[in-house]
Amino acid sequence: HLSASLGAILRSWYSHAMVPNAICIVAKCPIPGKSKTRLSAAAAGGGGLTDEGCALIAKAMLCDVLSSIHRAEALSSVVKFLYFAPADDDGKQRMGLILDELGIFHVDGSHILKQGDHRPGILDNAGGPSGRGLDVLRHDKWYLCPMPDARQSNLRSSDLGGKLAGMLDHTLSIV
């Protein structure tokens, strides 16, 4: 169902010439005991899934989203970011392994978050630099970026919307 919904959105963008310059996926790493916990046996009074089963469901959902976006022809010239939490080495390794399993080429995007006032450009339709900055973001790979402030704070906090808006603003400032 997700792939069909995503396809409808992409067709709408494409038909209205609204293909974005970048797409951001924000995801928590599928970790046993921390993913889809409401489905767990403990939360369901003994009738739910194991922690590992919950993490597998979360991983399957994430894989569906990532592979659908990666295969979407309408997004072939779009810069792709995967923001992840927890924003530590374990989170980075877990997300990298998921992308590897899907055969999706990716690079560490941590440096993008630290560039300050530099505004990298994106590739134009001809494949050359857009000329808007010194660095060039490429559409043929995914940028694996830690979610800003995800190390110090609780992702369930009431400020999660603000954190997500901050990531979107940051991404818009660099593409």
Image (cartoon, helix red, strand yellow):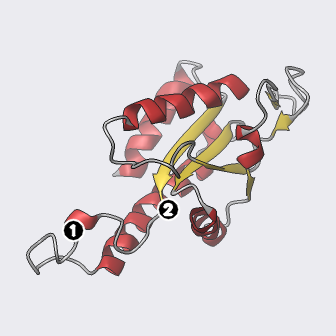
**Residue 157 visible at all:** yes
Q: Check disc 2 and report its element: helix, strand or loop.
A: helix
Q: Position of residue 6 (x, y in %)?
A: 44, 42
The image position of residue 107, as x and y in percent, is: 76, 55
Q: Quadrant of the C terminus?
A: top right
Marker disc for residue 158: none
Judge left or right: residue 35 versus residue 134: left
Q: Is residue 100 above or below residue 148?
A: below
Q: Residue at position x 68%, y 36% from top?
A: 78
Q: Is residue 14 above or below residue 56?
A: above
Dividing the picture into quadrants, the one containing residue 105 is bottom right
Tell me if mark 1 has few (under 14), some (14-19) or many (20+) residues whose alpha carbon lies within 10 angstroms of its own: some
Mark 2 to mark 1 CA distance (whole Å): 19 Å
Residue furthest to the left in view is 45
Name the residue carrying label 1.
39
Q: Which is more toward the observer, 96 or 170?
A: 170
Q: What residue is drawn where x is 50% and y is 49%?
A: 152
Which tag, 2 or 1, sits closer to the chain's start?
Answer: 1
Residue beneath the point at 46% across and 41% down: 7
Q: Which residue is mark 2?
A: 63
